[in-house]
Amino acid sequence: MRILLSVLLLLLFVPSWSGDERLALLPAKAEMAAHRVTLDWRDPARVKLGGLTFLGGVYLTGPKPAFGGFSAMTVESDRFTLLSDGGNIVSFRMGRDWQVRAPRFAELPDGPGRGWHKSERDSESLTRDPATGQLWVGFERANQIWRYAPGFARAEAHAAPPAMAEWPENGGAEAMVRLRDGSFIVLSESEDGDARGTRRGLWFAGDPVREPRRGFAFSYRPPRGFKPTDIAELPDGRLVVLNRKASLREAFTAVVTIVDRESVGAGRIATGREIARFAAPVVHDNFEAVAVTQEGDETILWIASDDNQWRLQRSLLLKFRLEA
């Protein structure tokens, strides 16, 4: 009885964890809102930004502290799925009225480690097979890629590609895309490429989870001072890369570049052509996610930001028509 009483007292009065606080998770009840934004606060009628035409945008709000931190996304028709760098999933529908409908909150069902700390769910990139609905997530720190069943119903398999083993702890698979031919491209945010000012890229001939050794390395040259944060494939096969820079003077700025698919080859350096730059007075933040959709003959770019779950930043979701 003394032993049993001691155990009960420990359970009642001793916290279950005395180390770091657990990763914040979203509540079961999904509630969020969208608030309209303009491209240029000084000129609300402005819509042109380089090779892009602004079609509208919002910033998203939801329950803190878990809401936000979005580092990757997919868009299928009017269904948006945003993945945070802590493994939280926010999905919703949104039409031309920019109102959020049918929101859902969830978290990744599995991943590196136990999932107690944010470092164990540092999910930075996301891509999807439109035919099967399967999803792939790239994790920094662990330098792993995980494949999930449609809707993130369960984790199916994962791999730690040898070519990513030595990538920096905070500069792993920052950007990832599954191309229509079934191959994958992964870009590191911080791992140096073969020339000064470049970043390491990997091309996988197929599913990197199934065949993590089948492919080649190349280099990507972002605009000077910038780092790649996401990548997507355009309908014509070109690649669109979102690049970000952080500085004390300008805070966060971003550049969108277009890369010809033919420039991605073993040992080559792929250089993007700048088509748009986000800096004051244009709306700008910590842009980390890009997705491509089509509306008739128009190619649409969606760009989202990671607010770092800080009150001075916003979770932006912007829509553009590609003109370049």
Image: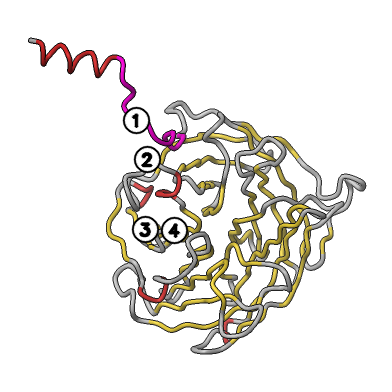
The residue positioned 71% from the left and 57% from the top of the image is 246
**Residue of label 4:** 141
- Asked which secondary structure carries label 3, the reply is loop
Q: Circle 1: is it few (<14), some (14-19), or many (20+) Cα within 10 Å?
A: few
Which is nearer the N-term, disc 1 or disc 3? 1
Residue 206 vs 267, above or below: the answer is: above
Give percent across and percent down for residue 193.
56, 80
Q: Circle 3: is it few (<14), some (14-19), or many (20+) Cα within 10 Å?
A: some
The residue positioned 31% from the left and 15% from the top of the image is 13
The answer to the question of whether label 1 and label 4 lie on touching residues, with beta carbons closer than 8 A, is: no
Give percent across and percent down for residue 6.
17, 15
Q: Nearer the viewer, residue 16 or 115?
A: 16
Which is nearer the N-term, disc 1 or disc 2? 1
The answer to the question of whether label 1 and label 2 lie on touching residues, with beta carbons closer than 8 A, is: yes
Q: Is residue 196 visible?
A: yes
Numbered circles on residues, count? 4
Q: Any magenta on residue 146?
A: no
**Residue of label 3:** 134
Q: Which mark is residue 17?
A: 1
Q: Which residues are magenta?
A: 13-24
Residue type at tag 4: Arg
Q: Quadrant of the N terminus?
A: top left
